[in-house]
Image (spheres, grey):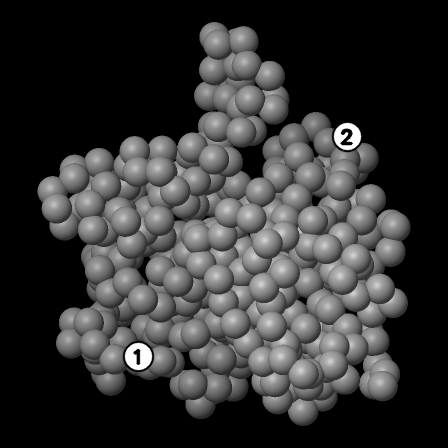
Amino acid sequence: MNILVPNLGSTSLKYQVLEMPSERVLARGRFERVTDYRDAISQINSGDVPIHAVAFKAVHAGKNYRGTFLIDAGVVAAMEEFLPAAPAHNAIYLTAIQAFRDAMPGVPLVAAFETEFHASMPEHATRYGVPAEWREQYGVRRYGFHGASHQYIGERAAAFLARPIGELRTVSCHLGGSSSICAIQGGRSIDTSMGFSPQSGLENATRHGDLDVFAVLYMMERRGWDAAEVGRQLTREGGLAGLSGIPGGDVRDLEAAAAAGNADAALALGVFACQVRKTIGAYAAAMAGLDAVAFTGGIGENSARLRSLCCAGLDFLGLRLDPALNDTGAGDRLLSPADSPVAVLALATNEELIVARRAFAILGDRP
């Protein structure tokens, strides 16, 4: 079975066509700084490879869809219901679902939700201090996202270090246009930085990250804004863009501006790194120790400066970077000295592989 996995991020689109169950990659491609997703989808090129199914790394459909499902009216309705919680993501995937239905009528479409990996989190890590009705009737809880990436990184870190995954305590740092961190103990997610929505946790490129909700209510009252206007500002003008004043909030642009003396860009990078450091420390406490920290995503894999800032001052946890290893090399690699108690890794994630495995598990070996 050949499964096309289009991975639509907040600023990018990459895809793979995988032959399952062999997991052989038949085609792949990537588009950066995407603004028109329907146009990018139309440029996906699988060559002469027939496509038997399309599997999406879908984002948010609430408590009843924390898994992998054939896309039907119920899945689409749930994604539409949670559109206000994930406007920058669900809208993209709803567009993509319709685009592929139009382009490939009759081909099965599968949604492998990002929240699936985090369904293992203990109850104390998922609950907010909100009225019970919010939680029980409307599903307000911590869901977590980037699940396919964190799952892959947890498995890859164990394989890279040649250690049983069941004994490993790993902090997975998925850092890119959209960023989150996950505490992985024994191969299972036990906590993660994103919560009810992908807007929470670390600052993202244009999305705000953690924010006191009463600051939002205060601004709505002072300026007379409605929910739609606040949502627009916080998803398009917040995050690293809001901190730096640089439209788009792309870390490559921020690093170039900081190197040229832009103090706001440098501060934005410092704020981001500080949040990563604090979260690594918190997750070491949650797991009663730490064996590995893995950096992945466009920033995590490629920015030596950000990795250095994120690890600064964490020696007390046994976490040390080797400057020479951090500044050079490519591919999956160790960034810490051989005698470091905590291994620091740069690993390329493979969300598409996790999604293809999940889709194949529910589709079976169709022709």
User: Where does the N terminus fall, quadrant-wise?
Assistant: bottom right
Would residue 153 be found to the left or right of residue 245 on screen? right
On the question of residue 231 being in view, the answer is yes
| Count of numbered labels shown in the rendering | 2
Q: Mark number for residue 330?
A: 1
Whole-percent x and y of residue 230?
53, 24
Would residue 197 be found to the left or right of residue 107 on screen? left
Closer to the camera in the image, 294 or 32: 32
Identified at 87% across, 67% down, the residue is: 106
For label 1, count other residues whose C-alpha is less than 10 Å away and answer few (under 14), some (14-19) or many (20+). few
On the question of residue 282 being in view, the answer is no
Q: What amino acid is found at the position of numbered circle 2 in the picture?
A: Glu
**Marks 1 and 2: which is nearer the front?**
1
Closer to the camera in the image, 217 or 320: 217
List the residue tagged with mark 2: 133
Most extreme residue toward the left, as rendered? 261
Identified at 76% across, 38% down, the residue is: 81
Q: What amino acid is found at the position of numbered circle 1 in the picture?
A: Ala
For label 2, count other residues whose C-alpha is less than 10 Å away and answer few (under 14), some (14-19) or many (20+). few
User: Where does the C terminus fall, quadrant-wise?
Assistant: bottom right
Whole-percent x and y of residue 322?
19, 74
